[in-house]
Amino acid sequence: MKATLCALLCASSLSACQAPATPEPPEKKGIHIPSAAEISSTQEQYYAEQLPLLQARNASVDATASIQQGKRYFLCNAGRSSTVPGIAAEVFATVRDKCPTECLDGVTDALYGENHRRYLAVALDYSAQWNKVMLTACR
């Protein structure tokens, strides 16, 4: 019995000394992990395409249609702000519990490049106009 236990302990301690298996690199598995530059480039192209579409929209008309459909929400500011564009912070504090806040696509504190910066500026202007219309429905 002691001999068996001793042999078992020796065998397990020897296997613990083996080098761990080296994982196969992702490129050998056929997986492509994009670089930060690739991600930024893809996002830049996307926002270049989205910018004219957003510019063609009318925030007041869109907000009014949303209210008529029973969908009431404010559009967010970029980043982790507790305010929304177009409404003073003290006013928003009185209505924030009545209507949720959502963000337009791309409204974030991350900046992918010049196209995204232009898109973000238009998105924040659109959001400010939307929020002014939505404020009446959320009081």
Image (cartoon, rainbow, N blue to C red):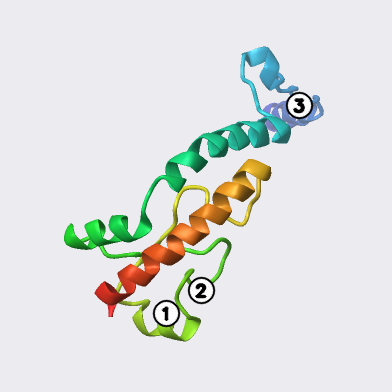
- Give the quadrant of the N terminus: top right
- Give the quadrant of the C terminus: bottom left
Disc nearer the start of the sequence (2/1):
2
Residue 46 seen: yes
| SS at circle 3 | loop
Quarter-of-image position of residue 134 = bottom left
Left or right of 42? Residue 75 is left
Q: Which residue is mark 2?
A: 82
Residue 126 versus residue 14 in the image, above or below: below
Kindly identify the amino acid type of the residue bearing the numbered disc 3.
Answer: Pro
Kindly identify the amino acid type of the residue bearing the numbered disc 1.
Answer: Phe
The crowding category of the residue bearing disc 3, from other C-alpha atoms within 10 Å (few below 14, some 14 to 19, many at least 20), is few
Q: Which residue is mark 3?
A: 20
| SS at circle 1 | helix
Residue 75 seen: no
Q: Residue at x 75, y 22 (%)?
A: 22
Q: Nearer the viewer, residue 89 or 24?
A: 89
